[in-house]
Amino acid sequence: LNTMADWETGYILQGLTAQTMVGEVKYQVKTVGITKEPIRTLGGMTMVPDCPIEEVSLDSVGALLLPGGETWKEEVHQPVLDLALLCIEQKIPVAAICGATLALADLGVLNKRTHTSNSLEFLTGLSPTYTGSSFYVNEMAARDGNVITASSAGGLLWAKYILESLNIYSKEVIDAWYGYFSTGRMEYFMELMEASQN
């Protein structure tokens, strides 16, 4: 989507590239837009979606990642939100960060699930259908079943929860990966290298 917060997907994209280190590549990243028309990200990059939403087949989706952006409340995004509801129903992970959590709030998805966002006031102030404040947690990211949410500052923990939900790495690999990127300590990097070989 135009105004996509491109930096919020950085950690999960890096985490998914590590599949080449452990052998089999189970999941490929595909960018999906309403159309294949180029979009302009909030960071100033021009991106061309791999495919339009109408070409997405539910049985080919391993997870649906919804990055932040300033235009989620626009009606044009309804087909993506319809896909999100189908994914949730089929137990496919749906991960929303920053502004995309507002889109899930508008759908009623967060009314009965543990979740987070930029702040509770962000959701209560901008979503007229949101009634899930008792399920809100003041954390960088939250996971409730197959729904993963994060604040704009929670990209790393959001990525960890996504990787865990995809079952492509062992706990040791994920813990070493998260430890390295959250601290920069070399021992975690060495653990990651070692765990990736097992």
Image (spheres, grey):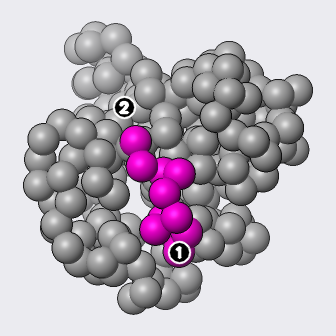
In depth, the one of 14 and 126 nearer the eye is 126
Residue tagged 2: 177
Residue tagged 1: 79
The residue located at (31%, 40%) in the rendering is 5
> Which is closer to the viewer, label 2 or label 1?
1
Query: Where is residue 70, by image quadrant?
Result: top left
Few, some or many C-alpha atoms within 10 Å of disc 2 (few <14, some 14-19, many ≥20)? many
Q: Is residue 14 visible?
A: no
Q: In this image, 172 relative to 114: left or right?
A: left
In depth, the one of 40 and 57 nearer the eye is 40
Q: Are marks 2 and 1 in contact (CB under 8 Å)?
A: no
Q: Quadrant of the N terminus?
A: bottom left
Query: Where is residue 143, by image quadrant?
Result: top right
In depth, the one of 174 and 195 nearer the eye is 174
Q: Residue 9, image x and y in percent?
A: 33, 43
Name above or below for residue 71 compared with residue 76: above
Residue at disc 1, secondary structure:
helix
Q: What residue type is disc 2 on?
A: Trp
The residue located at (24%, 39%) in the rendering is 42
Name above or below for residue 12 compared with residue 29: above
Name above or below for residue 71 compared with residue 194: below
Q: Residue 148, image x and y in percent?
A: 61, 44
Report the magenta residues as a range: 70-80
